[in-house]
Structures are given as C-alpha cells and as structure tokens.
Amino acid sequence: MATFLIQNVVFHSGMTKEHRIILNAIEEALNRDPELRFGQALFNLSINQFVNPDNPAEADYKMRDIHGDKDSDIIARIRRQQEWRELQQKIMSALEKPDLNGIGGMTVNERLYVSGLMDDFDKYKKSNKRFAQFILERLKVDRDSIEKILK
C-alpha cells in the first residue's frame, strides 16, 4: 500500500507505481501549461485518443474507448508523446542556430550535421519514420527527397 502527502495530510492508498507515473505526467502537463484544461492534458498525453490517431477524420473524429487499456500501455503512449514534444523542442532550438542561414544551399547531411540533429535522425530513421520525416521537413528537405531517404 502506497503512502503519499497532499497539503500536509497523509493518505494511504492502494495506488500502484503505474498510477503514480500517470498522475505525475498529468500533473507535469498541467503545471507546464496552467491554461490547459484537464481533458486537453489527457488528450495531449495520448491517454485519450481518436479511434484512428493517424487519420481522425476517417473515423469521424470518434474517441477510442480506453477502458481495456493496461496502465503499461497508457504509460508507453505518454512516453511516446513526451519524446515527441522533446523532439519538437529540440528541432525548434536547432533551427534558431545562425549556422542554418542559407539552409537551401546545403545537402541533407550538412543540414542534419549543422543543426545537431544527425544522431536523432539516424535513430528515428530506424525506429520511428514519422519522427524522422518531421526532422527532414523542418530542415526544408523536399518531399521527393524525404520519400527516397526514408525508403
């Protein structure tokens, strides 16, 4: 049985380690953006999802029933979303580098190297094509080249 302290009151709970991880992620999201509504935090963390997350319109923007999801599945989705947010932040910071002025005249490898995103791109090219594609798009690589590179 877990014990935790909220506003100087000790509670004993049957809360699991997984519950605490999920609640901490929600708390972190709400603290990061106090204007965020609770339901938005659940959606942004991928706790709640569309039936078809890749193409929500295909299922008429219906929400998926998560009743049968294991806590470990929810934690995995939260971690993917956190990784996605961190990658977006890293790319935004990289694009602010003065060395990336004149990016249009650089090769793809030069863009990846100068931006500091080469290792991330190599990792995601193998493990997450959507993330790898996002990196290339932000580095202004043309669509045909992206398709060839990610094949």
Image: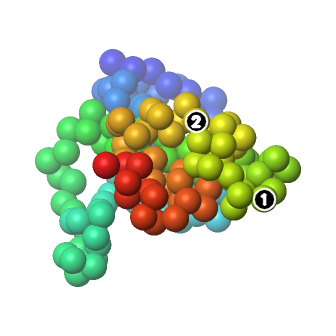
**Residue toward you, 81 or 22:** 81
Q: Are marks 1 and 2 in contact (CB under 8 Å)?
A: no
Q: Position of residue 11 (x, y in %)?
A: 46, 28
From the viewer's perspective, is 96 left or right of 84?
right
Q: Can residue 147 be seen in this view?
A: yes
From the viewer's perspective, is 137 left or right of 43?
right
**Residue toward you, 130 or 66:** 130
Q: Which label was assigned to residue 121?
A: none
- Kind of residue sitting beneath label 1: Gly
Q: Position of residue 110 (x, y in %)?
A: 66, 43
- Kind of residue sitting beneath label 2: Met
Q: Mark 2 points at which residue?
A: 118
Dot 1, crowdedness within 10 Å: few (<14), some or many (≥20)? Answer: few
Dot 2, crowdedness within 10 Å: few (<14), some or many (≥20)? Answer: some
From the viewer's perspective, is 96 left or right of 30?
right
From the viewer's perspective, is 11 left or right of 109?
left
Q: Is residue 128 above or below residue 13?
A: below
Residue drawn at (33%, 18%), measured in percent from left and top?
1
Residue drawn at (19%, 45%), measured in percent from left and top?
69
Q: Which label was assigned to residue 102?
A: 1
Q: In this view, does 143 lie above or below 7?
A: below
Residue drawn at (20%, 38%), measured in percent from left and top?
70
